[in-house]
Amino acid sequence: MSARSLSAQCVLVMLLLGQGLVGAWAARESEALERAPVAGDAAPEAVGSVPSGADVVRMVESGLGGARAYDLALNDQGGAPFFEIKSIKDGNIWSTVIDVATRRVVSSTVVMPTAELQGNDKRDIEAFQRSRMPLTEAIAIAEQVGAGRAISAGLSTTEGKLIIAVVVVSNGALKEIHVEPDKRSQRRRPR
C-alpha cells in the first residue's frame, strides 16, 4: 500500500469519525467516480460509523452468489464515502461499490476476465484461489487483533508467501495487519 493511499485513507477515516476535515472532500474532486454516491444521499446519522469490512464483503459475496472477494478499499473520490470490493466469479473480476452510510450496493460490474490478469495480480489471485481462507475470515481476524474496523484488505506476496494485508482503524490510528491464509496455526502477523 502506497504512502499516498494510506494518507488518503487516514483523512477519510478522520472525516468519518467526525474530526472536521471537510476540505479533504473538495481536494479530491478531480478523481470523481462516475457512479459513486453523492454526499446528499447519505443518512446523517450513519456517516459517523464505518461498518465491519467483513460484513461488507459478506454482503457482496452473498449478493453475487458464488463470488469470492479478494480486495476491499474505502474511498471517497470527491463524494460520499464508499467501499469498493473486488471479487472473482465465473472467471471474471467484479467490482462492487457499497455506500458506507446506507450500506447499499451502488453498482456491481464485470471489470475483466481473470484470463487477462498478468504479473503480480495473476500470481496473487491464483494463490488466493488455492487457499482455503476467505477474505471475510482474514478481515475478522485483523479486526479482532487490531481492535478496530477494517478499511482496506488486499493480496500481497511476502517472502514468496501469499498474505492478506488488512488496514484497521482503531482509536483514530491505522494499523496494518498481515494474515497468512495458508498458516492455520499462526494466521496473523501484526506489523
Image (cartoon, rainbow, N blue to C red):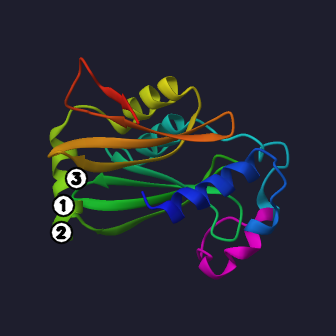
Residue 41 x %, y %: 78, 60
Residue 176 x %, y %: 46, 41
Q: Is residue 135 left or right of residue 117?
A: right
Task: Give the amino acid at mark 2.
Answer: Gln
Q: Is residue 24 left or right of residue 190?
A: right
Task: Give the amino acid at mark 3.
Answer: Ile
Q: CA distance from mark 2 to mark 1?
A: 5 Å
Outermost residue on the top side: it is 185
Q: Nearer the viewer, residue 26 or 36?
A: 26
Local secondary structure at mark 3: helix
The residue to which callout 1 is attached is 122
**Residues in magenta?**
25-39
Task: Indicate yes or no whether the magenta region holds residue 34.
Answer: yes
The residue to which callout 2 is attached is 118
- In the picture, the quarter occupied by the C terminus is top left
Is the residue marked by circle 3 packed among few (<14), some (14-19), or many (20+) residues within 10 Å? some
Residue 186 x %, y %: 26, 21
So how many labels did they put on this image? 3
Q: Is residue 71 above or below residue 145?
A: below
Can residue 186 be seen in the rendering of this structure? yes
Task: Indicate yes or no whether the magenta region holds residue 111.
Answer: no
Q: Is residue 109 above or below residue 98?
A: below
The residue to which callout 3 is attached is 125
Residue at 24% in and 55% down: 90
Pointers 2 and 3 in contact (C-beta within 8 Å): no
Local secondary structure at mark 2: loop
Residue at 36% in and 66% down: 110
Q: Is residue 163 left or right of residue 25?
A: left
Residue at 22% in and 43% down: 162
Pointers 1 and 3 in contact (C-beta within 8 Å): yes
Task: Give the amino acid at mark 1.
Answer: Lys
Is the residue marked by circle 1 packed among few (<14), some (14-19), or many (20+) residues within 10 Å? some
